Image (cartoon, rainbow, N blue to C red):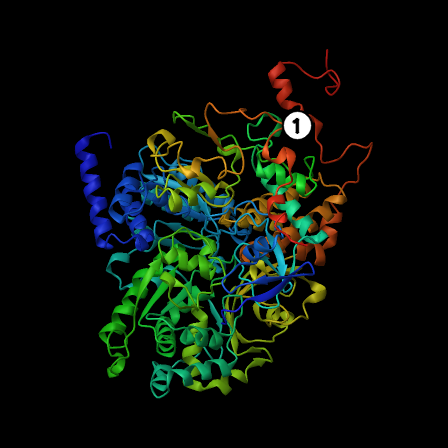
């Protein structure tokens, strides 16, 4: 394959891409935002939340894992793709217990922000699964409420690949699949508040909770209170 | 566990097991199977030990152990009975058999007896639909169960008899092949030209020796052979891609993980044509330049392992496996059996490779495709049992012979495993292109009201469509053909299959993990008579999202039992729908909604209990 740059088209806009880039990487560089939850800057692509599903050459693929190819025609923000993403985000809301008014992550939460971006403002037709897993507050600086986990696995990859620790991992199968810790509880792992995996940017929701810093930034002044999710990428666009 | 001495011994045993597999994390399924077999569970101590020995973290080991149905993180009985709860088994009287086991062993389904002697569980399709109800007892199987037989089995087990002897008296004294033949009937009803008729030994391999690898691939491609597991990819092309990928090693993997409910044709091939299978794998190895292979055998087929190992050993002894096969210098190929551990998803080729690597059975991100980067990152050909067998026959008889059978685009013969409401359940080898109605005549299922072709991932066909043909382009199937008589409740069948997919979803991606649960709950509303007219649209809409956004074939097909019955049997839905009356949704059951409040308040409702105050 040639090392030369080529073009792909996203919603009618032609952008440059390089061999080896995924559709999402090329889009990010060009200032086109493709919604995503399990993908995060600096972490391996996983392709599990499926929120970045696009139609590429007529086929549904996850933009975070699908390589860009010359002259690929991609549908991103068409009504149909937005509808599919809305369904996926709703599924994640209904799979866990996401009570925004009482959640410390509200305003910084990517799940909540994604719902707003996709025009979801109220619970919908899906049933609630209402998990009731125990809170793990054993660690002096960190608490874990997996009832709010969306199994994006960002903490797993951050701990493994950035912190070189392996504090987190998936256990179980199917609807029982969830994030668990490398030991009987968090206090018996080598998790530290300074870990990248524990940092505010890695957990997109209110599952990993840093103790004693909650509500330091008041609601109303938080990241997504002032900007739509994805705007920082769209600002790169030069047209 | 509490005594330090016992714990030390346990640690030493676990260390020995790990050492037997070279402390290799890629052999995690084998290690966990050995620990599970010995201890009847994977204890927290074992998790720690295995992690330490294999260089993984405890959570990584736990991730594998908690993924597969046959591993348990709580103690199981020394004898575990797994009763197959496929819909066919249910229709064949499974419930009464379950009750007899419960009575005989004095535990309920899902429980383990207090003395640690027995566990009773349900498990999805174990590939014995032609002799249902069936069950696994540890690694052996019992078929055609009746309540009386279940009681007798329970009594014998409680009397201390070994499971092997209970399943088959005289087991210990028999050679492996005789054991499997006596334990399980093959029910070969129709032998075709390629696989189940007379097959001269090693004829394909001999011809392959006279050809270059490129000629072998050309022959297989020219024959029109397509993958027989269900997806139907052109086999020769798959081999060509793997051969063309520059690499220092390549692998041949046989997918013997047939788990699609109603499929059991590979079981019959593994019993009847094991040499042909390994011959086909050996030919594939020569074609693509592989020296190592893996036969991935589903956990439910553990009863076939010794028999298959005997075949492999026999071929090694005859110089048909190993170094310099049939005396040709440089023609080296050998294989090992990799056991599965109860996970339907491992039939998906990426998930199967993950499982071979000792990982949870999660599909891999594509691209890269297995032919480019598969097992351990090397180019890998994964083919179904039947595909390898056909390939060996094509090498013997020639591409044109195979190509001339069947129809355009669907060449050769195909094994169909037929079960359900028909006179002659079993395996039929027939050329592609037969009308479904003709097959129904052959199997004695003419009064069928519905036929599920291709298992739950396939199509539920109504009578008006029995003229359709069994080909890749019309009614595609990996082999399953399940016949349902007019007595059956199709909504019950649909609900069962959705519960199967919920149980078997790996949980990696959102739509399959969560969406299938919602779909199952929605069908439950229809079953309970609580559905509104708009719920039909909801079923279609949700199905579409799951299909379009799922990561692998499981989620891309799991809504098909709903969609194909909505299409072909719309009346089964409309018959149970209740339109909203009084602007109160039928789906809202006020009595059950206030039940918790009644209990908490310890009184009855003024509005909703008519007898309030009496």
Task: Please give left or right for residue A145 compared with residue B498 in the image.
Answer: left
Residue found at the far front of this picture: A238
- Front residue of B421 and B508: B508
Q: Quadrant of residue A142?
A: top left
Numbered disc 1: secondary structure: helix
Q: Quadrant of the C terminus of chain A?
A: bottom right
- Front residue of A188 and A15: A15
Give the percent coordinates (x, y) of residue A204.
Answer: 53, 38
Name the residue that disc number 1 marks.
Answer: B592
- Front residue of B135 and B339: B339
What residue is drawn where x is 24% and y is 33%? Answer: B1
Give the percent coordinates (x, y) of residue B86.
Answer: 51, 51
- Front residue of A58 and B584: A58
Give the percent coordinates (x, y) of residue B195.
Answer: 44, 76
Q: Chain of mark 1?
A: B
Above or below, A73 against B42 in this view is below
What residue is drawn where x is 47% and y is 56%? Answer: B363
Instruction: Please say whether residue A157 is visible from this viewpoint.
Output: yes
Counting other residues with Cα less than 10 Å from the Cα at mark 1, is it few (<14), some (14-19), or many (20 or more)?
Answer: few
Residue found at the far right of this picture: B582
Give the percent coordinates (x, y) of residue B474.
Answer: 64, 70
Task: Please give left or right for residue B366 compared with residue A168 in the image.
Answer: right
Instruction: Please say whether residue B80 is visible from this viewpoint.
Output: no
Task: Please give left or right for residue B257 compared with residue B487 in the image.
Answer: left
Task: Please give left or right for residue A176 compared with residue A90 in the image.
Answer: left
Q: Quadrant of residue B517?
A: top right
Residue found at the far left of this picture: B5
Q: Quadrant of residue A228?
A: top right
């Amino acid at each position: 394959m040639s090392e030369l740059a080529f073009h792909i088209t996203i919603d009618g806009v032609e952008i440059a891409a390089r061999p080896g880039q995924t559709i999402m990487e090329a889009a990010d560089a060009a200032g086109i935002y493709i919604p995503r939850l399990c993908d995060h800057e600096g972490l391996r692509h996983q392709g599990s939340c499926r929120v970045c599903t696009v139609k590429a050459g007529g086929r549904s693929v996850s933009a975070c894992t699908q390589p860009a190819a010359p002259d690929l025609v991609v549908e991103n923000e068409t009504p149909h793709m937005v509808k599919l993403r809305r369904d996926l985000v709703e599924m994640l809301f209904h799979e866990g217990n996401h009570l925004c008014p009482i959640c410390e992550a509200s305003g910084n939460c990517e799940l909540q922000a994604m719902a707003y971006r996709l025009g979801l403002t109220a619970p919908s037709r899906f049933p609630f699964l209402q998990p009731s897993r125990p809170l793990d507050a054993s660690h002096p600086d960190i608490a874990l409420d997996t009832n709010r986990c969306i199994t994006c696995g960002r903490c797993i990859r951050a701990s493994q690949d950035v912190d070189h620790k392996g504090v987190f991992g998936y256990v179980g199968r199917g609807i029982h699949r969830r994030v668990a810790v490398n030991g009987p509880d968090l206090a018996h792992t080598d998790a530290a508040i300074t870990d990248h995996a524990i940092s505010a940017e890695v957990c997109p929701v209110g599952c990993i909770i840093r103790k004693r810093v909650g509500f330091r930034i008041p609601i109303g002044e938080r990241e997504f209170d002032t900007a739509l999710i994805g705007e920082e990428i769209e600002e790169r666009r030069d047209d | 566990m509490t005594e330090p001495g016992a714990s030390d011994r346990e640690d030493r045993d676990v260390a020995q097991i790990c050492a037997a597999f070279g402390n290799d994390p890629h052999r995690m399924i084998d290690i966990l199977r050995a620990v599970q077999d010995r201890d009847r569970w994977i204890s927290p101590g074992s998790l720690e030990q295995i992690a330490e020995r294999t260089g993984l973290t405890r959570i990584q080991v736990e991730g594998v152990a908690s993924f597969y149905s046959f591993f348990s993180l709580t103690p199981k009985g020394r004898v575990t009975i797994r009763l197959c709860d496929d819909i066919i088994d249910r229709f064949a009287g499974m419930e009464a058999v379950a009750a007899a086991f419960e009575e005989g062993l004095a535990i309920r389904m899902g429980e383990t007896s207090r003395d640690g002697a027995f566990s009773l569980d349900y498990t999805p399709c174990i590939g014995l639909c032609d002799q249902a109800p069936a069950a696994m007892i540890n690694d052996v199987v019992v078929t055609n169960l009746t309540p009386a037989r279940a009681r007798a089995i329970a009594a014998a087990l409680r009397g201390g008899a070994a499971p092997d002897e209970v399943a088959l008296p005289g087991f210990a004294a028999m050679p492996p092949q005789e054991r499997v033949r006596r334990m399980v009937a093959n029910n070969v009803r129709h032998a075709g030209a390629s696989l189940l008729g007379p097959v001269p030994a090693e004829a394909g391999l001999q011809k392959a020796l006279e050809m270059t690898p490129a000629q072998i691939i050309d022959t297989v491609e020219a024959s029109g052979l397509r993958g027989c597991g269900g997806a139907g990819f052109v086999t020769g092309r798959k081999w060509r891609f793997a051969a063309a990928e520059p690499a220092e090693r390549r692998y041949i993997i046989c997918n013997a993980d047939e788990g699609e409910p109603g499929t059991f044709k590979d079981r019959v091939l593994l019993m009847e044509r094991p040499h042909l299978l390994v011959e086909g794998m050996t030919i594939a190895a020569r074609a693509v330049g592989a020296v190592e292979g893996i036969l991935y055998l589903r956990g439910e087929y553990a009863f076939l392992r010794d028999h298959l190992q005997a075949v492999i050993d026999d071929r090694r002894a005859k110089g048909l496996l190993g170094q310099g096969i049939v005396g040709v210098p440089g023609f080296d190929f050998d294989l090992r059996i990799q056991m599965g551990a109860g996970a339907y998803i491992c039939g998906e080729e990426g998930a199967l490779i993950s499982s071979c690597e000792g990982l949870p059975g999660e599909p891999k991100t594509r691209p890269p495709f297995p032919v480019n980067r598969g097992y351990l990152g090397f180019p890998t050909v994964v083919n179904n049992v039947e595909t390898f067998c056909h390939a060996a026959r094509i090498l013997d008889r020639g591409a044109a012979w195979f190509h001339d059978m069947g129809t355009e685009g669907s060449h050769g013969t195909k094994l169909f495993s037929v079960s359900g409401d028909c006179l002659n359940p079993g395996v039929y080898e027939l050329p592609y292109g037969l009308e479904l109605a003709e097959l129904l005549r052959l199997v004695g299922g003419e009064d069928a009201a519905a036929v599920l072709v291709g298992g739950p991932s396939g199509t539920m066909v109504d009578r008006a469509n029995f003229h359709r043909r069994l080909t890749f382009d019309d009614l595609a199937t990996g082999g399953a053909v399940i016949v349902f008589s007019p007595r059956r409740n199709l909504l019950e069948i649909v609900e069962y299959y959705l519960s199967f997919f919920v149980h078997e979803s790996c949980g990696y991606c959102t739509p399959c993990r969560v969406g299938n649960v919602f779909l199952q709950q929605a069908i439950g509303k229809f079953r309970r008579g609580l559905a509104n007219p708009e719920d039909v649209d909801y079923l279609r809409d949700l199905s579409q999202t799951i299909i379009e956004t799922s990561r692998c074939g499981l989620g891309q097909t799991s809504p098909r039992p709903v969609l194909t019955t909505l299409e072909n049997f719309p009346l089964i839905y409309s018959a149970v729908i209740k339109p909203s009356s009084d602007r109160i949704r039928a789906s809202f059951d006020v009595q059950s909604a206030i039940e918790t409040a009644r209990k908490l308040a310890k009184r009855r409702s003024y509005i909703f209990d008519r007898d309030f105050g009496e």
